[in-house]
Image (cartoon, rainbow, N blue to C red):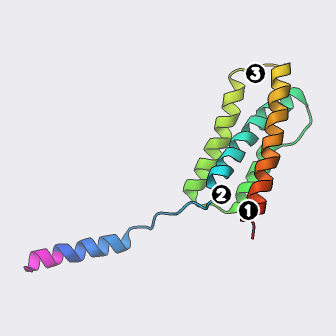
Amino acid sequence: MTAPLRLLAALLVSAGLAAPALAIDPPYQRQMERLAEIMGSLYFLQPLCEPASEDWRQQMAELIALDEPDEDRRQRLAGSFNGGYTAFARFHRQCTPASREALKRLLKEAQLLAREIHTRFAE
């Protein structure tokens, strides 16, 4: 191997070693993103139908803090939360029977997801 090729190989190897390792999502990431989306939806819907209720934004912040995700995962969780909020904010201006039904179903799904994540993945 010629000197320039050795230098190039050494640079490529050192560049590969210096590159940050890609984070691997935990096995519950998909469920966490769905839970975040639901919590965002609840953050919009619940005050619309039940004033002075749970602060879902605060609950999400606490959940993220407990999970201690890297910045990429934190951004995806926040994006899911915001997406859930936006999805319901587009169509619901006042509490309707459809809003109440969505609220009921979302609360049930959130409970099931939280229980599943805890049961399957909590240490």
Question: Left or right: 25 with respect to 57?
Answer: left
Residue 37 at x, y percent in the picture: 69, 41
Three-letter amino acid code of the residue under disc 1: Arg
Residue neighbourhood size for the residue with mark 1, other residues' Cα within 10 Å, grouped as few (<14), some (14–19), many (≥20):
few
- Magenta stretch secondary structure, dominant: helix
Give the number of the disc on residue 28.
2
Residue at 38% in and 68% down:
19
Nearer-N-terminus badge (3/1):
3
Foreground mark, 1 or 2, reads 1
The answer to whether 27 is drawn above or below residue 82 in the figure is below
Residue 58 at x, y percent in the picture: 79, 48
Residue 84 at x, y percent in the picture: 68, 36
Nearer-N-terminus badge (1/2):
2
The answer to whether residue 112 of the structure is visible from this angle is: yes
Magenta segment: does it hold 65? no
Residue at 91% in and 31% down:
51
The answer to whether 82 is drawn above or below residue 15 in the figure is above
